[in-house]
Image (cartoon, grey):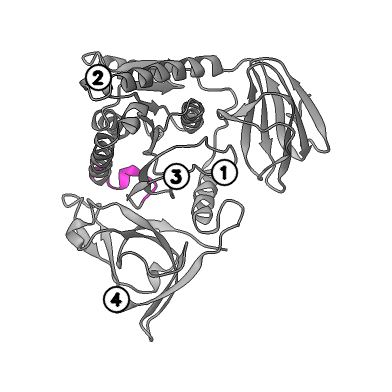
Amino acid sequence: MSADDGAASSGRAFVLEKESELRVEVGSEAPLGLRLASGNAEIFGAELPPEKWITVQPSQKIAIFTWKGATIELEGVSEVEYVADETPMVSYVNVHAILDGRRSRAMTNKGLDSSRGPRAIVVGPTDSGKSSLCKMLLNWACRRSWKPTFVDLDISQGSITIPGCISASPVQTPIDAFGGIPTEMPVAYFFGHTNASVNVELYKVLLTELALTLERRFSCDVEYEAAGMVINTMGWVDGLGYELLLQAVSTFNANVVLVLGQEKLFSMLRDVLKSKPHIDIVKLHKSGGVVPRNQKTRQSSCSSRIKEYFYGLNNDLSPNSLSMNLDDISVYRISGDPPAARSLVAVDINQEIIHSVLAISYAKDPDQIISSNVAGFVYVMEIDMESKRITFLAPCPGEPPSKVFVMGTMKWSED
């Protein structure tokens, strides 16, 4: 059954043969119901529960894959739905098997120099399926009882926190296909923009800070060290973007480079990394289900991620309104202007910063801001210059852990 040329509605069932997948694009107006009626199936490596209806939110694009066969039922409206029997999943799971073997060897050799687990970095152009592959590798590892660390360097997307950050978190339970990434002990550094070209030098500095933090964590826990990392990267792969990819490979000591969807990038990386035999470079095909996104869709996704931070995926959180005296807080911006690409500028707090998203820094003084990770984020709702009060939207009640805030170009509106 297919609905490529128009919206499909009402209840329908799809019988999937082994190693095939059902690709669905949900419409923008209403959610879609999904149920695994028989067999086994997964979405991004997360197993679907049997005979349980699941709500897929509007505008989501999913691929339901089965290794041995399954029957999937859908209820509601979708824009596109079709079954594909040619997928790159076998090559993806073969990568997982190799990473799994390295994790096992690392645990066997714990305490030795060879105890480092796999550090797989996923690279490729925009809309090549990097985030989806990362979820699969993380979920398959979790299903094998590993606790890999997910590192998200894609500031345009914000899989762990919000866009504008580079961040990391160990993943201890499988990632729900329709929810956020479950984070334990997340660490985030605020870049403040969704385009790395705004301040390339700052981006490099934050890469180093995050890598050092993770190395300290790994040195204290052989289990995390053996489980290794899965590192997601930006889709900027030309010019300075390519240089930043190489920087990330080096900074995080990646030993597996997975190249999705571009022969040219694979060839370039193979040539430049051939002097480093400890790094394996693997070329992978992108899934035919990957759908290119236009600029409007990207902006909408960015806004949705910020809203989700404050209100939850299904509007199930209740953020708090927080009012503070202007004299009690400090707001800084990290300059992106050469030659002082890492200098701090105090921000004049006025009406112009309304609708800005600010990071709450752990820094005790301004000199520590660049090297400090952040505790969370607030949204500037209102500024009353007469009473000298500022009102924030915060994800939870209580005073923030710091009164040092960092501002970038991140804007958002609740409307």
What residue type is disc 4 on?
Answer: Asp
Q: Which residue is mark 2?
A: 114
Q: Earlier in the sequence, mark 3 or mark 2?
A: 2
Position of residue 354 measured from the top left corner of the image (x, y, whole percent): 42, 69
* Residue in the image at 60% along x and 57% along y: 316
**Dots 3 and 2: beta carbons under 8 Å?**
no
- Residue 66 screen position, x and y as percent: 65, 21
Q: Up-down: is 44 above or below 381? A: above
Tell me if residue 69 comes above or below residue 247 in the rendering. above
Q: Label 2 is placed on what type of residue?
A: Ser
Determine the image quadrant of residue 183: top left
Q: Quarter of the image holding residue 214?
A: top left
Q: CA distance from mark 4 to mark 2?
A: 50 Å
Q: Comparing marks 3 and 2, which lies closer to the viewer?
A: 2
Q: Nearer the viewer, mark 3 or mark 4?
A: 3
Q: Label 1 vs label 2: CA separation?
A: 36 Å
x then y, percent, for residue 227: 37, 28
Q: Amino acid at mark 1?
A: Gly
For the residue labelled by badge 1, is the local secondary structure a helix, a strand or a loop?
loop
The residue at which mark 3 appears reads as 183
- Which disc, if any, is residue 179? 1
Q: Quadrant of residue 112?
A: top left
Disc 4 vs disc 2: Cβ atoms closer than 8 Å? no
Which of marks 2 and 4 precedes in the sequence?
2
Q: Which residues are magenta?
A: 193-201
Left-right relation of 4 to 284? right
Q: Marks 3 and 4, how far apart in space?
A: 31 Å
